[in-house]
Image: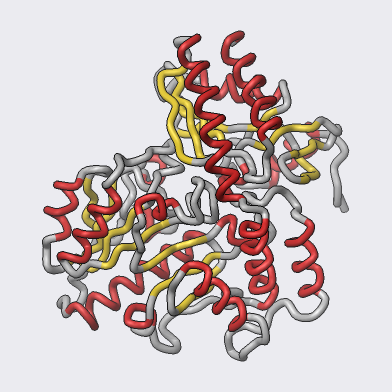
């Protein structure tokens, strides 16, 4: 039995032969992580500038989170929701108090949390708003990314998410992102139960809407009795310089969807938060998950969120994000290879002056890896740059030096 590998080539060959080809990774094989660093099987050290798509905001293998995991794993890991356990209620209170909601519903993956939000919004639409059965509509926006289930991709405008995966679920109206007039037209329809948006579109390439867009969306939802469903799976938990990206505009979602860094990258944990009027439309037997709300996850989520608070990671992201964007903006002035720098906090992207079909951004990321920094393109010519939030200013400058050197010499 092969239980370990000794070379990168061996690991890549095994995945290629025995694994599904549903990802196209940068060809490095990682076997250890600590803080902002990752090491490959040959022992080379890298700065992590992807953070597992913002799941390891607290840094790799944070000792406080790992200790919570180990201690709980020795006691009890899973009961299912057929019974109570001694950790779930404590964790539910903790996240409700942290984010300011009355009820929490734990799931596992981000996609599951978004599916949960869809069901909540629809049931609320039928039982509270009075929408006729099977006529509820959820308004989504172009270039969204909420997951890859067949329901979720029914609201996607990305051909790689939808081609050859139909037929699709009805009940979605897709409008332009960052367009208030398009929102008002869509939300005014009496059958609309929810507006489903990301405060910043991370997977699409870190698209940041204009100031005031989220506040206008919140106001329109109140005006037309529509639930604001905010997907903060990638933008939440301090990534953008606030605990939630929607906090930048003082916007409160009716349904808040969280995942990724909720566990510090230790376990798949997601949660949907809402107040009683919304959450309690779901009755026993109508929704659930065998692993959702397991005691191991409950212990981990509290430790992971406490690290964010104790280490002031939102403040660190806000401060160092400005440093990073200043360095990248200066670099853009010195080369025509970068056409745009955008982001908030430590969720940032640079747009490479080439077509999305070119391999320039990929090749730049390969060069980053050679110089000890890991990042990955999205949508062809956009490179997302998002380190763990425990990074220091000295390390930010060291990473900017690497990025600058690669791009100027590419």
- Residue 161 is left or right of residue 27, and the answer is left
Q: Quadrant of the C terminus?
A: top right
Q: Position of residue 346 (x, y in %)?
A: 54, 40
> At 46% from the left edge and 20% from the top edge, which residue is drawn?
352
In the rendered image, the vertical position of residue 298 relative to residue 48, given as above or below: below
Q: Camera-side residue: 167 or 130?
A: 130
Q: Camera-side residue: 120 or 311?
A: 311
**Taking the image as drawn, is residue 148 in sight?**
no
How is this picture coloured?
secondary structure
- Residue 106 is left or right of residue 193, and the answer is right
In the rendered image, the vertical position of residue 175 relative to residue 395, given as above or below: below
> At 85% from the left edge and 33% from the top edge, which residue is drawn?
43
- Residue 237 is left or right of residue 194, and the answer is right
Q: Position of residue 320 (x, y in %)?
A: 58, 36
Q: Camera-side residue: 296 or 9?
A: 296
* Displayed quadrant of residue 77: bottom right
- Count of marks overlaid on the render: 0
In the rendered image, the vertical position of residue 362 relative to residue 300, given as above or below: above
Q: Position of residue 214 (x, y in %)?
A: 30, 51
* Displayed quadrant of residue 340: top left
Q: Position of residue 298 (x, y in %)?
A: 64, 74
- Residue 238 is left or right of residue 370, and the answer is left
> At 27% from the left edge and 46% from the top edge, which residue is drawn?
212
């Amino acid at each position: 039995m092969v239980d370990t590998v000794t070379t990168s080539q061996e690991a890549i060959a095994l995945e290629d032969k025995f694994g599904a080809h549903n990802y196209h990774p940068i060809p490095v094989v990682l076997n250890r992580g600590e803080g902002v660093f990752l090491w490959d099987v040959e022992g080379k050290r890298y700065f992590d500038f992807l953070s597992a798509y913002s799941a390891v905001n607290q840094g790799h293998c944070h000792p406080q989170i790992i200790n919570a995991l180990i201690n709980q794993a020795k006691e009890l890991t899973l009961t299912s929701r057929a019974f109570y356990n001694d950790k779930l209620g404590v964790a539910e209170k903790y996240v409700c108090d942290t984010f300011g909601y009355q009820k929490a519903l734990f799931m596992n993956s981000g996609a599951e949390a978004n599916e949960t939000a869809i069901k909540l919004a629809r049931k609320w639409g039928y039982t509270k708003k009075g929408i006729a059965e099977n006529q509820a509509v959820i308004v989504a926006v172009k270039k969204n990314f909420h997951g890859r289930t067949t329901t979720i991709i029914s609201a996607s405008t990305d051909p790689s998410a939808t081609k050859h995966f139909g037929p699709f679920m009805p009940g979605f109206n897709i409008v332009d992102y960052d367009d208030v007039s398009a929102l008002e037209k869509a939300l005014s329809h009496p059958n609309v139960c929810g507006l489903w948006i990301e405060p910043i579109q991370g997977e699409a390439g870190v698209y940041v809407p204009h100031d005031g867009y989220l506040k206008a969306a919140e106001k329109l939802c109140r005006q037309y009795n529509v639930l604001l469903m905010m997907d903060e799976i990638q933008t939440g938990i301090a990534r953008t310089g606030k605990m939630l990206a929607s906090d930048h505009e003082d916007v409160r979602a009716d349904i808040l969807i969280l995942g990724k860094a909720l566990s510090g990258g230790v376990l798949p944990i997601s949660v949907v938060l809402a107040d009683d009027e919304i959450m309690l439309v779901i009755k026993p037997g109508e929704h659930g998950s065998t692993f959702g709300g397991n005691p191991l996850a409950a212990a981990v989520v509290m430790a992971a969120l406490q690290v964010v608070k104790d280490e002031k990671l939102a403040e660190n992201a806000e401060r160092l994000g400005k440093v990073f964007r200043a360095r990248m903006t200066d670099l853009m002035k010195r080369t025509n290879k970068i056409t745009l720098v955008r982001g908030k906090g430590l969720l940032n992207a640079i747009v490479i002056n080439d077509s999305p079909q070119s391999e320039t951004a990929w090749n730049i990321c390969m060069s980053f890896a050679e110089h000890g920094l890991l990042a990955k393109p999205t949508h062809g010519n956009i490179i997302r740059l998002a380190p763990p939030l425990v990074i220091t200013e000295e390390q930010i400058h060291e990473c900017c030096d690497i990025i600058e050197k690669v791009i100027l010499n590419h």
